[in-house]
Amino acid sequence: MASDADPCPAPAAPSRLPLAEVEALARRAHEGQTDKAGRPYAEHLAAVAAGGRGRGGNEAQIAAAWLHDAVEDGAVSADWLAGAPLDEATKAMVLAVTKRPGETVEEYTARILATPGALLVKEADLAHNADPVRLAVLDAPTRERLTAKYARVRALLGLG
């Protein structure tokens, strides 16, 4: 979990961070973390950002893609995000795709659908998470569980 001293303190300047700085911040925040296959977590962040860009995402969406798991994974706190020099739309999208303890998948997906721009970020996230090449390195029970989970979320989001 994020402590009071986040690993990525917000710059003192009130202006918004450019995308290159958002990327660097996200990479620092997730440094040392790995995905379920043991790969550096930054690879997932980069893939989601690229997926957002490839889907026509705007700068706020691409920034949210870089930060989409930062609060959920405890890499930064919600308080840090609230005060960060980021576009308000970016902050809203990050919070929309952040799963909350005890929340149902229906509540989670409804929040994503209700937040402008968040669906594109989640679609890019799901696309990378469900990539057959990425899933192939997992054991069969984990692969099957995740495939079913991602399919359900996609259906609830109207992504097919």
Image (spheres, rainbow, N blue to C red):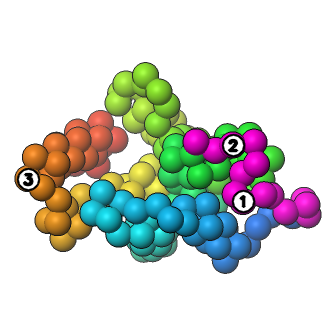
| Residue 80 located left or right of residue 52 | right
Q: Which residue in the structure is indicated by mark 3?
A: 140
Across and down, in percent, residue 71 comes to 58, 45
Label 3 amino acid?
Ala
Find the distance from the CA under tag 2 to the CA under tag 3.
Answer: 36 Å
Q: Are marks 2 and 3 in contact (CB under 8 Å)?
A: no
Q: Nearer the viewer, residue 133 or 51?
A: 133
Find the distance from the CA under tag 1 to the CA under tag 3.
Answer: 37 Å
Label 1 amino acid?
Cys
* SS at badge 1: loop
Disc number for residue 3 = 2
Crowding near the residue tagged with mark 3, few <14, some 14–19, many ≥20 C-alpha atoms within 10 Å: few
- The quadrant the N terminus occupies is top right
Task: Write the residue at 35% across / 69% down.
Answer: 39
Find the distance from the CA under tag 1 to the CA under tag 2.
Answer: 11 Å
Numbered range of the magenta stretch: 1-14
Q: Which residue in the structure is indicated by mark 1?
A: 8
Task: Write the residue at 55% across / 66% down.
Answer: 31
